[in-house]
Amino acid sequence: MDRSTTAAATASPSDVTPENPQAGTSVLDGMPRQRGDAVTETSAPRPSASRPLARTRALARTRAPRPWRLLPTPTGTPFTFGYAAVLAVVSVTADHAAPSLVHALQQGSSTDVAHLVRHPVLVLLASALWIAGGIASMYAAGFVLVLTALERRIGGLRAAGVFLLGHVVATLATEVPVGLSVLAGHLPGSSLHRLDYGISFGVAASVGALAGLLTPWLRWPVLIGFAGVLIGDLIAFTDPMTDWGHLLSLAVGVSTWPLVRRRHRAGAGGGAGGGGGRTGGRSAGDPAVRPVQTSGTVAA
């Protein structure tokens, strides 16, 4: 069987120069990984072992459970933290103030038709300073948990926008029909002064928006469970206008999925390892780090 031979089996001492230190070394035919190959291979870049290790540690820290992130902080979630502090002060004050004073303040903050016609912006903002049922209600806990999670994903400005959008749209959608019904004579004039305040519309919209950022196995149970509670309240027919507003605000939150997902993806892309999560080192199998065959040898 024919085997090719080296270009020069031996070299004279005069061929050994500083530029060619290997010229005086004979190369055996058919033997891989000889000294000429080793020199070329060592000059190729080696993958850094510290980079994958550092990235593994960073991912472990990211995936580790951090229950304290469920609560708002002044630096991490300033909107939720500041808003929750205001709600807490208002709720504690209402618990210790005279009932007549509290009722007068709530009546003045109500988003009923009479107030919406005269001072729409003022009452829309003032009505969102009260928690129906107090600081121990379900919507107070939902506000803290849901708004914190939403703000951490899309930022404070957009989380405030989602909350305000649900609050305003659901309020107008429930109060405008009341005013039209009074004009048509289907409802009495006292319906123009119904007591309507609270953060529940904004919380429901935030739940709908947050569900779009969760994984499917968590998204649909959250949506179905929350919608089931709202439908149960509607069937009970205790306050149908408010209950319809909760369902509508939940739908408003769901409608924001394209916007909040776009923002969430943009924020995730700007994090660590922004190059799609790829490591900087090359693997041993990369062609760029394979041994380079010397010109003096030919493969068998």
Image: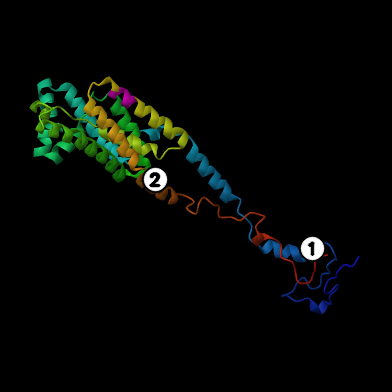
Q: Amino acid at mark 1?
A: Gln
In the image shown, does 31 or 287 lie closer to the viewer? 287
Q: Secondary structure at mark 1?
A: loop
Figure check: 140 above or below 167: above
**Residue drawn at 51 percent across, 44 percent down:** 58
Q: Is residue 25 visible?
A: yes
Q: Secondary structure at mark 2?
A: helix
Q: Which residues are magenta?
A: 229-234
Figure quadrant of the N terminus: bottom right
**Residue drawn at 31 percent across, 45 percent down:** 158
Q: Which-is-in-front pick, marks 2 and 1?
A: 2
Does the magenta segment cover residue 246? no
Where is residue 42? Give x, y as percent: 69, 61
User: On the picture, is 24 further left or further right than 126?
Assistant: right
Q: Which mark is residue 261?
A: 2
In the image shown, does 252 or 143 lie closer to the viewer? 252
Residue farthest toward the right in the current orientation of the protein: 1
Figure quadrant of the C terminus: bottom right
Where is residue 207? Give x, y as percent: 34, 34
Main SS category, magenta section:
helix
Gap between marks 2 and 1 measured at Cα? 56 Å
Q: Quadrant of residue 204?
A: top left
User: On the picture, is 49 further left or further right than 117?
Assistant: right
Q: Quadrant of residue 211?
A: top left
Q: Which mark is residue 34?
A: 1
**Residue drawn at 33 percent across, 43 percent down:** 256
Q: Amino acid at mark 2?
A: Arg
